[in-house]
Image (cartoon, rainbow, N blue to C red):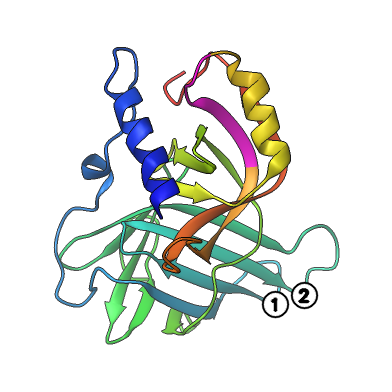
Amino acid sequence: MKKVLLAIAAMGMLAALPGCNHRSDEQALPVGASETLAPMQQSWRGILPCADCEGIETSLFLAKDGTWVMNERYQGVTKGPSSFASYGTWARTAEKLVLTDSKGEKSYYRAKGDKLEMLDREGNPITSTLNYTLEPVKASLPLTPMAMRGMYFYMADAAIFTDCATGKRVAVANNAQLERDYAAARGSETKPVLLVVEGHFTLEPNPDSGEMIKTLAVDRDAKFIPGKSCSN
């Protein structure tokens, strides 16, 4: 935990310098309130209707930091990939759960007891005899890779990734090649470098404290882009 905290503290000092514009955690937090949806780790799963497949097995994971991950598996698909993952931030109103993905697109759900019901693109109930409900479950985060873009920083044997879409900082799983590529990309300056990558989130024990923390695991196509940031 000490290593991660040192890396985060160093990034905080760098962000305070002129020219560093990282979205703060406060700005990324969800707004609104609801007595039904509590701000805690929650997950749901169900099979939603599909126009050209047998059904979409949908798993939704809400994290207490205001972020979410969704995995959709298209049943009966024989050609091409059948599983896709997405992520973003969630917010609550008195009646709805609003999911905003990493591209800025929104989807809507509402609580029905301990279940979630999918709403249409305008946030209205769907009139149908088909099932649009997700049931509460206990499950692990999906391993399906997702395209991500954020500022990578490595210091004191710990790496931190600040996601451009959500503004959230997460630890990065040990990856010697990524650390070498970062060293080459940053040159002689100790600063974050923009990283474009396909990866997934997981919960891993902190080596110092044993606490389970959200961690980015890199899957493929990692590329550093020196001189760029989340805003350009």
Residue occupying the point 50% across, 79% down: 45
Disc 2 designates what residue? 76
From the top left corner, tell me how far across and down residue 21 is, in percent.
33, 23
Marks 2 and 1 close (CB-CB < 8 Å):
yes
Quadrant of res 85: bottom right
Residue 46 sits above or below residue 87 on the image: below
The magenta segment: 189-197
Q: Is residue 33 magenta?
A: no
Which residue is nearer to you in this view: 149 or 114? Answer: 149
Residue occupying the point 67% across, 46% down: 175
Q: Residues within 10 Å of mark 2 (few under 14, many from 20)?
A: few
Residue 155 sits above or below residue 57 on the image: above
From the top left corner, tell me how far across and down residue 205 is, in percent.
50, 66
Q: What amino acid type should be assigned to the residue bearing mark 1?
A: Glu
Regarding mark 2 in the picture, which secondary structure is present there? loop
From the top left corner, tell me how far across and down residue 220 is, in percent.
73, 44
Q: Is residue 194 magenta?
A: yes
Residue 199 sits above or below residue 232 on the image: below
Please say whether residue 149 is visible from this viewpoint.
yes
Please say whether residue 103 is visible from this viewpoint.
no
Residue 203 sits above or below residue 169 on the image: below
Disc 1 designates what residue? 54
Residue occupying the point 48% across, 49% down: 171
Residue occupying the point 53% across, 65% down: 204
Q: What amino acid type should be assigned to the residue bearing mark 2?
A: Gly
